[in-house]
Image (cartoon, rainbow, N blue to C red):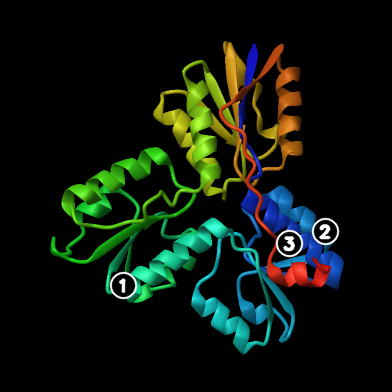
Amino acid sequence: MKLLLSKPRGFCAGVERAIETVEKALALWGAPIYVKHEIVHNRHVVDRLKNMGAIFIEDLNDVPVGARLIYSAHGVSPAVRDQAKARQLIEIDATCGLVTRVHSAVKRFASQGYHIILIGHRNHVEIIGTAGEAPNVTTIVESVADVERLQFPTDSKLFYITQTTLSLDDVKDITEALLKKYPAIETLPSSSICYATTNRQMALREITDETDLVLVVGDPKSSNSNRLVEVALKRNVKAFLINNETEILPEWVKGVKVIGLTAGASTPEEVVQKCIQRLVSLGVTEVEDVIFTHEDVVFQLPKQVLVALGA
């Protein structure tokens, strides 16, 4: 039995920056440090940071007045920032720069009189934050069916943009439906699906033709991890999302010759390695890296942290 390891996989630059922001804040100012929402969608990461003294909250009323608050990689709405200021919180922004780019575009086009069509999962924290930039002129669409239900006149000023962690397959179908219905709709010159989501999906596509089974190491809450599972399923390859090695069932590999393995952008490599060891114990005899591209993106830490570090 052969194991193909898809690369790139695991941590992206935005996730590394967000995690390091919490670690550095704890080292600089001590516990507790409050974080709005899980810093990234991965239980292993969140539990480790909790043990170091991070407190993850959803309601800003749970943060003492004047305390430090870190915004997660997924971003927050202006209403959250206003509430933080009202509570005199010291804000540290770990929002991924690629999410911030989407927020800025929504704000800019809304101010120019456009109605915003936001493609994404309406209950995902990133979409909630992005929609909050222009809540009165934003419509969220999750599917082609949602596009078909839109009632805007064809000459409306419309602008569409996407959540950064969506499936390339799904977005293609939805944007084609939008352009067919509203040929004059506008968008950014380049995709708002982030480089890491794109690379991980493209890397997995490279190996699905060769595999009988795909395992994606990632948290059930992780959008980009779930989209990786869908990439395999859409290509008629059996696929499972696993959070750790104990979730790999022996019956999955019965009769399987080639397994593909990848990991979501918030999955620690140490968890991936334990999954590889588990697969070896279940009969994998050959392990091969399949490299789609090399990533060298680095995002600078938030200025509040850099200033405190004297950088």
Distance of label 2 from label 3 (alpha carbons):
16 Å
Above or below 228: residue 69? below
Q: Residue at x 63, y 46 (%)?
A: 297
Q: Quadrant of residue 151?
A: bottom left
The kind of residue tagged 3 is Thr
- Callout 1 crowding tier (Cα within 10 Å): few <14, some 14–19, many ≥20: some
Between disc 2 and disc 3, whose residue precedes?
Answer: 3
Q: Residue at x 40, y 49 (%)?
A: 190
Q: Position of residue 129 (x, y in %)?
A: 49, 67
Percent coordinates x, y for residue 122 in the rendering: 41, 59
> Distance of mark 2 from mark 1, alpha carbons?
41 Å
Residue with the mark numbered 3: 21
Residue at screen point 57% across, 10% down: 255
Identity of the amino acid at label 2?
Asn
Q: Nearer the viewer, residue 236 or 311?
A: 311
User: In the displayed structure, would residue 218 be above or below residue 202?
Assistant: below
In the rendered image, residue 162, in percent from the top left (x then y), is placed at 40, 54
Q: Nearer the viewer, mark 2 or mark 1?
A: 1
Query: Which label's residue is closer to the chain start, 2 or 1?
Result: 2
Of residue 17 and residue 257, the one placed in the foreground of this image is 17
Q: Position of residue 7 (x, y in %)?
A: 61, 30
- Regarding residue 125, the answer to whether it shows in the image is no
Q: Which structural element holds mark 3? A: helix
| Residue located beneath label 2 in the image | 51
In the image, what residue type sits under mark 1?
A: Val
Q: Is residue 252 shown above or below 117?
A: above
- The residue beneath circle 1 is 137
